[in-house]
Image (spheres, rainbow, N blue to C red):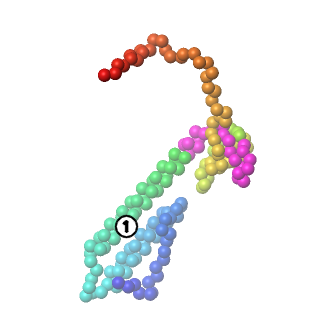
């Protein structure tokens, strides 16, 4: 089957991202319907198209729509998880590196804002994107006990010795 040159076909990105997803999806639906109508309009009357083909195409397009919906929902879930995680970091001590990657700084997160590129932390008056953080929490390792006395509970049941068979 050929489509006449007078019919215009536009293309959309294969993997739409961001806010253009809804617009691109509606454009894809419109394009699919236009192509299906063009196939029906210009088919050979002596050799009509198989109705099973149209059903298969429709089923594939429906499956693609559902996968896009799942992808959008997973993206929203990831965004909310990132927001909760970033919010929980307020008050934490962090270390981060400058944009040029040469200087390391330490400070305490006092707030979080959310932009298109993800969370941006307010650390001692400086705006620091998530990607620049190096560590979260205390920068010194936890103290290890130096006392070698036995700290086991004397009232706890003791393991009985096993005998080899």
Q: Is residue 119 above or below residue 50?
A: above
* Quarter the N terminus occupies: bottom left
Query: Where on the picture, by quarter, is residue 63?
Result: bottom left
Q: Nearer the viewer, residue 20 or 119?
A: 119
**Residue 37 placed where, x, y %?**
36, 78
Query: Looking at the image, which residue is at 39% across and 60% down?
Result: 66
Residue of label 1: 61
- Direction from residue 9 to residue 121 in the image, left or right: right
**Residue 100 placed where, x, y %?**
72, 53
- Direction from residue 165 to residue 13 in the image, left or right: right
Query: Looking at the image, which residue is at 46% across and 70% down?
Result: 27
Q: Is residue 164 above or below residue 118?
A: above
* Quarter the C terminus occupies: top left
Q: Is residue 111 above or below residue 60?
A: above
Outermost residue toward the top in this view: 155
Does the rendering let one see residue 91? no
Q: Nearer the viewer, residue 2 or 137?
A: 137
Element type at mark 1: helix
Circle count: 1
Span of residues in magenta: 83-105
**Residue 88 placed where, x, y %?**
58, 39
Is 84 colored magenta in this rendering? yes
Outermost residue toward the left in this view: 46
Specify few, some or many for label 1: CA neighbours under 10 Å numbering under 14, 14-19, or 20 or more: some
Outermost residue toward the front in this view: 165
**Residue 15 placed where, x, y %?**
49, 65
Q: Nearer the viewer, residue 31 or 13?
A: 13
Query: Looking at the image, which residue is at 44% across and 70% down?
Result: 28
- Direction from residue 57 to residue 131 in the image, left or right: right
């Amino acid at each position: 089957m050929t489509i006449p040159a007078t019919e215009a076909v536009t293309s959309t990105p294969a993997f739409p991202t961001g806010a253009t997803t809804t617009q691109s999806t509606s454009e894809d639906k419109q394009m699919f319907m236009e192509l299906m109508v063009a196939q029906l309009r210009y088919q050979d009357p002596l050799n009509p198209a198989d109705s099973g083909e149209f059903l298969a195409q429709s089923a594939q397009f429906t499956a693609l729509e559902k996968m896009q919906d799942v992808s959008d929902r997973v993206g929203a879930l990831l965004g909310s998880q990132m927001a909760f995680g970033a919010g929980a970091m307020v008050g934490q001590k962090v270390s981060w590196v400058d944009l040029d990657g040469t200087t390391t700084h330490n400070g305490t997160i006092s707030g979080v804002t959310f932009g298109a590129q993800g969370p941006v932390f307010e650390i001692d008056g400086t705006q620091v994107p998530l990607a620049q953080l190096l560590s979260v929490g205390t920068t010194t390792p936890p103290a290890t006990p130096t006392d070698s006395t036995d700290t086991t509970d004397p009232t706890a049941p003791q393991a009985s010795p096993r005998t080899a068979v």
